[in-house]
Structure formats: structure tokens, C-alpha cells
Amino acid sequence: ASVLILNGPNLNLLGTRQPEVYGKTTLADVEALCASEAARLGLDMQFAQSNHEGMMIDLIHQARGQHDGIVLNAGAYTHTSIALMDAISSVELPVVEVHLSNIHARETYRHTSYIAPVALGQICGFGAHGYVLALQALQNRLVS
Ligand code: DQA
């Protein structure tokens, strides 16, 4: 099986961006962590990041036929993007929503997720380890 791990806006700055909130782990560290967990689980993976909503939508469309599931950290688009929600509904691939921070313990505008209603589930608050948990959850769903 194959998974797309898609990261949204500002996540390219991970490690230097508000380290008190998001930690010192860089996106390259997250990618390395995902690569080793995917290999352990026997999953192929594509790791991507974009600051552009439309690019993220294109990547979700392309995932259809190419991948069996998606791990998605949509960044702030989580809280705003009906278009991303519709893209997920359209491709009918299982999606696990991930956030490094616990969005429910933060500002109220981060409590709403347009991804959550179309995701298998949401993992947040565990930092980069959340991606490992998401891959395990997706693998579990794909084999069962
Ligand atoms: C985030 C949480 C979002 O609210 C924020 O806009 C981000 C990162 C997280 O991983 O904790 O960009 O998705």
C-alpha cells in the first residue's frame, strides 16, 4: 500500500517557527521519521508540503489511483478550507488528520476543523510523533 503525507502552509518553516508551540523538529526530521515508520509498516510513501491551497487540492486529486490513503496536516487551511474538505470527499481516500499542537487547547478559531468531518480521525497534540500514530492508524485501516 502507498500513502501521501501532505503538509500545508508554513510547515516548511518547522523548527524555526514558534518553537515554543511546534518544537524544534524540522520538516526534514518529520519526513525522516515518516520514512522510517512507513518502511517498518511496509508502506510506500510520498511526502509533500505546499503553501498553496490549490496545489494541495491538486495533490489530493492526484493521490487518487496513486495512493491508498492520506495523512494530512493542512495547517491553518484546516480551519478555513471547505475546498480541501470537498477535495477529500471527492477522491474517497481514507484521510488521517494530524496536527503537531493540540488545536483544541489553543485559540477558539483553531477548534473548528473542516477536515475532521471527512477524516477517519484526528491526531493532535503529540508533536511529530502524531505522524507516526497517523501512519499506524492508516495501515491498520488499510489491512482490515
Ligand atoms: C497546525 C495547527 C494549525 O492551527 C496551524 O495553523 C498550523 C499548524 C499544527 O500542526 O499544530 O499551521 O496544523
Image (cartoon, rainbow, N blue to C red):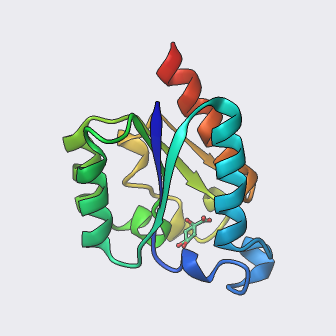
* Residue at x 40% of width, y 68% of height: 77
Please identify the quarter of the rendering in which residue 107 is found. bottom right
In the picture shown, does residue 117 fall above or below 125?
above
For ligand 1, the image quadrant comes to bottom right
Q: In which quarter of the image is residue 50?
A: bottom left
Q: In this view, does 3 lie to the left or right of 19?
A: left
Q: Residue at x 43, y 62 (%)?
A: 78
Question: Can you tell which quarter of the image residue 108 is in?
Answer: bottom right
* Picture mark count: 0
Query: Is residue 81 depicted above or below 17 in this figure?
Result: above
Along the viewing direction, whichever of 129 and 126 lies nearer the viewer: 129
Q: Where is residue 58 in the image (x, y as percent from the top left)?
A: 24, 62
Q: Can residue 100 be seen in this view?
A: no
For this rendering, which residue is in front, 71 or 65? 65
Q: Nearer the viewer, residue 129 or 103?
A: 129
Residue 78 to residue 69: above or below: below
In percent of the image, x 52 and y 17: which residue is there? 143
Is residue 45 placed above or below 111 in the rendered structure?
A: above
Asked if residue 143 can be seen in this view, the reply is yes
Does residue 106 appear to the left or right of 51 in the view shown? right
Which percent across, then down, holds residue 44?
52, 40
Name the one closer to the observer, 1 or 84. Answer: 1
Residue at position x 31%, y 42% from top?
66
Question: Horizontal and vertical percent for residue 105?
Answer: 68, 61
